[in-house]
Image: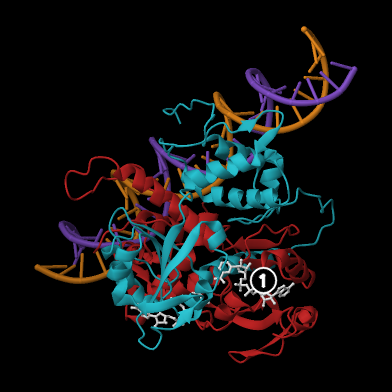
Chain colours: A red, B cyan, C orange, D purple
DNA sequence: AGGCGCTTGTGAAGACGTGCACAAATCGCG
DNA sequence: CGCGATTTGTGCACGTCTTCACAAGCGCCT
């Protein structure tokens, strides 16, 4: 379990073959740290303390230190973390050293927004193909990419090494599209359609459902409203909530 | 889990004054159950077992039963759950009995897609206002709504009882927009900008960052690739598994 | 009426995640 | 060269979440 013994000085990181099998919760936070680190690097920071970085990423500093400790010892006591080195290490662990090719299926309302978004490039991804089943959409050019027919997927997969498939079709078509993606060897899928996908073992699916996010917010809104029914005799209703929330992302922060 | 007693018998499913303080993990899954239930209802189901519903929602059946048990006893042993009743109860708990008004700030690339999406209506929400800071966008009509200037937010808030604010502006503007939303009384925010927001206590923020989702997938892709280097021992590999995975998490089963 | 099969609801155990608190390590400085 | 200030890395305790396993409850059939 506890067997890391880094010489302290990286210098040449060489190959890092040993994937340390990170806790899932840590994996989910690393991208947030990475974003914060890039911000810091752009602002000129060369090192940052766990306190500073955790504030920038919106998490507890002990949690951040524990997360980073899973990658190895890349901090210096009394100083902090080397920003550039840490960026390199996190990108390494996340597999972002190679720019991964993304296939986007379903170029409708949402698909257009995704296809036109230029923010993915800076985060390690490249939209490699746009696909749709509607003949009238095929041929359309968006952001320098031409929409192709979804049945061309095998051809596209042969041209590019597709790492991730994004599904932005209606829910009714999502399972079929997922099957097509899996058939051409895609083993990671991001699904925007509000439905559950069945995929073979070894294929990872993540889902983004905006309505669910809103409904979770609605619950808390509802709860807050029913609490407000209590006497609000002070003006400032700073009733410290007992249990904080801590799901994927709920925060109440303090202003610095 | 000790100090709430349910009368047990619903009888009238009317007012539910006592909010049972659900576990956050449960709250995050209720919307998924709700969606699956609506599907079942549309298909003609009147009752459903925990096994059936959990398959439709992509979760473990014991987990589903425990989740639902927190709402009270709305199932019948030997039979299952009444679909219509369960829908009503979940919508009640989530506070979806009233259609909540959503203000969307930032009508750009992504904002257009959200504004044009007609899927929110069926899930309990109504886009009540579109706001942007760009004068050239103000006045544009999308889906029957006219884009107003973000500085009109106080006026909008006076007209409508805004429940939720959605931020779809560039990250640089997100904090300022959040402040404006909070200033007019919004206490729930869904943030699409890749940045951390500071908000006063009592305000809930949920974040959706597509690049983060992709990066998490990238990590697993990376890990799978490094494992594939292992000998492809045959053995009894393929085990038929219960359909339905997918969710927040991923699944893997590489045994050591 | 009684038994039988099915399904819920939940106790208990274990896995997982979090945050405190502090020893160990490092730097800067006199 | 040693000392104090600072910050990392982590042991530990605690809370939350998941999963199993099964008694209790319900309906149906004989
Ligand atoms: N637009 C939003 O803001 C939004 C918000 C939340 C969720 N969603 C979900 O995202 C998905 C897409 O939404 P949208 O608004 O872009 O819908 P849309 O109808 O505008 O676009 C769907 C696109 O998918 C294409 N398509 C249909 N079947 C296909 C198939 N088998 N293979 C390939 N392409 C196919 C259609 O031709 C169309 O271009 C839906 O599932 C929706 O519920 C969208
Ligand atoms: N488009 C996508 O698919 C996508 C994907 C992931 C993340 N995002 C994020 O979503 C956000 C929006 O992305 P986009 O592609 O729509 O950007 P965009 O530039 O197309 O749109 C941004 C809109 O916000 C408006 N705006 C700017 N400052 C404002 C302010 N202070 N008040 C009100 N409105 C203001 C702009 O006028 C513009 O209309 C960004 O933070 C982006 O990183 C977008």
Q: Position of residue B95 (x, y in %)?
A: 45, 48
Q: Is residue D14 above or below residue C3?
A: below
Q: Is residue B207 above or below residue D16?
A: below
**B140 or A182, which lies in front?**
B140
Q: Which residue is mark 1?
A: A169
* Chain letter behind tag 1: A
User: Could you tell me which residue is drawn at 30 percent across and 42 percent down?
Assistant: A229
Q: Position of residue B39 (x, y in %)?
A: 67, 53
Q: Is residue A133 above or below residue B208?
A: below
Mark 1: secondary structure:
loop
Q: Position of residue A253 (x, y in %)?
A: 31, 58
Label 1 within 8 A of ligand 1 by Cβ:
yes
Residue A27 in sight here: no
User: Could you tell me which residue is drawn at 67 percent across and 68 percent down?
Assistant: A170
Q: Is residue C5 above or below residue B218?
A: above
User: Could you tell me which residue is drawn at 71 percent across and 90 percent down?
Assistant: A139
Q: Quadrant of residue B218?
A: bottom right
Q: Quadrant of residue B102?
A: bottom left
């Amino acid at each position: 379990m506890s067997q890391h013994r880094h010489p302290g000085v990286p210098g040449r990181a060489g190959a890092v073959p040993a994937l340390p099998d990170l806790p899932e919760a840590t994996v989910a936070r690393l991208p947030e740290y990475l974003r914060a680190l890039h911000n810091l690097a752009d602002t000129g920071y060369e090192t940052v303390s766990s306190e500073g970085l955790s504030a920038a990423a919106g998490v507890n500093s002990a949690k951040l230190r524990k997360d980073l400790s899973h990658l190895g010892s890349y901090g210096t006591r009394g100083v902090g973390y080397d920003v550039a080195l840490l960026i390199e290490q996190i990108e390494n662990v996340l597999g972002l050293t190679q720019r991964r090719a993304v296939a986007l299926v379903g170029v409708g309302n949402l698909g257009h927004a995704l296809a036109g978004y230029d923010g993915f490039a800076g985060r390690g991804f490249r939209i490699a193909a746009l696909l749709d089943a509607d003949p009238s959409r095929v041929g359309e050019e968006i952001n320098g990419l031409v929409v192709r027919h979804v049945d061309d997927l095998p051809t596209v997969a042969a041209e590019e090494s597709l790492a991730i498939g994004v599904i932005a079709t209606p829910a009714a078509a999502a399972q079929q599209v997922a099957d097509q993606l899996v058939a051409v060897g895609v083993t990671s899928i991001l699904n925007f359609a509000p439905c559950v996908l069945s995929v073979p073992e070894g294929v990872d699916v993540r889902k983004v459902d905006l309505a669910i996010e809103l409904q979770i917010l609605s619950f808390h809104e509802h709860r807050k409203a029913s609490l407000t029914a209590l006497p609000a005799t002070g003006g400032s209703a700073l009733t410290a909530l007992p249990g904080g929330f801590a799901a994927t992302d709920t925060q109440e922060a303090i202003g610095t």
